[in-house]
Image (cartoon, rainbow, N blue to C red):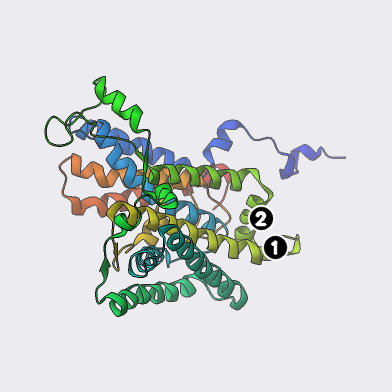
Amino acid sequence: MADVSHTDERIKQTSRLRQALIRPELGGIVGTVAVFVFFFLFAHDSGMFNAQGVMNWSVVSAQFMIIAVGACLLMIAGEFDLSVGSMIGFAGMMIAIFGVTYELPMWIAILITFAICIAFGALNGYIVVKTGLPSFIVTLATLFILRGFTIFIPQTLERKTIIGGIREAAEGDWLASLFGAKIGKPIFQWLGDAGVISTFERGSRMGEPVVDGIPMLIIWALGLVIFGHWLLTRTRFGNWIFASGGDADAARNSGVPVTAVKIKMFMFTAFCATVFAVCQVMEFGSAGADRGLLKEFEAIIAVVIGGALLTGGYGSVIGAALGALIFGVVQQGLFFAGVESSLFRVFLGVILLAAVILNTYIRRIITGER
């Protein structure tokens, strides 16, 4: 009898180097290192890497990270959601309508908004799986529907498309503080007093550290990344996500509840978009009908930079988080480096193309694909 170990791919030994090279995070890791090296060389003395500079690009990266987690899991499940950006604008406006216009307690306004947005996510998923239509088309329609509501509702109720007063309405609200507060203020004050980080030298904030805490936006981003990575790599549901995106028919024949998996991933994507929206309106104190424009594409780009395949069944939440980090560092780094800000998209496009080519090339070499 022939030695099965030489013919059966299922029990073939794989070196750790080979395993590392075919990881989806490879492009994101290389891109992250390249970006940091570039800006350290050209912007190290610009303030980009002091406390305030680090906080600036960390906040921007966290924004991308929140929506990238949802987009990543959905893409691995084999679907897209192009309504994410409109969902952000819609969610922010609903909070303003319920909390400011109708003067409901802010925690109730936030919970109602989450319920509505997650319901839209479930509807997206239901239509996709029941009709067999491409999620690209279904969510493109939802993009326009939500953006239309985001403009129509405030114009009808308030005769304007920007509603302020959210920060005042959220004052002292327990749930709003989970999205708009900062943590670690005593620690940062101590660091300022010790001279580790800079403090204000004049004005009403004299003696206070320039960075006075970690925004909850960053905490939400890290929490969602940890949860998404755990769900994808440590649970049976994570295996179902990979299976649903890899080969839905084969997954169904194996007993995977593909319909439920895809609908839940659409709902989770809507949840992440709503988290982003709540953090945003709490930071700005207002909601605008134009919020969230192009965020759906930025989320997808971050996920692709992180190594996910557009065809589904392959990807990594950690890779998506690295893609989001690249986004934030590049966007803020160009400003610190004194580069024309309009080149941000050019720089990002180069990184995207390089990451995709690297991931594809390495995977083909290792797996023997053509």
Q: Is residue 50 left or right of residue 143?
A: left
**Residue neighbourhood size for the residue with mark 1, other residues' Cα within 10 Å, grouped as few (<14), some (14–19), many (≥20):** some
Amino acid marked by disc 1:
Pro
State the residue at coordinates (60%, 47%). Answer: 231
215 on left or right of 47: right
Residue labelled with disc 1: 257
Spot occupied by residue 128 in the image (x, y as percentages of width and height): 56, 73
Where is residue 18 drawn, in percent x and y?
57, 36
Image mark for residue 31: none
In primary-sequence order, the first of circles 1 and 2 is: 2
Q: Is residue 3 above or below residue 130?
A: above
Considering every residue shown, the one lying at the far left of the view is: 202
**Residue 33 pos. (x, y %):** 36, 35
For label 2, the residue is: 240
Dot 2: what SS?
helix
Q: Quadrant of residue 248?
A: bottom right
Q: CA distance from mark 1 to mark 2?
A: 8 Å
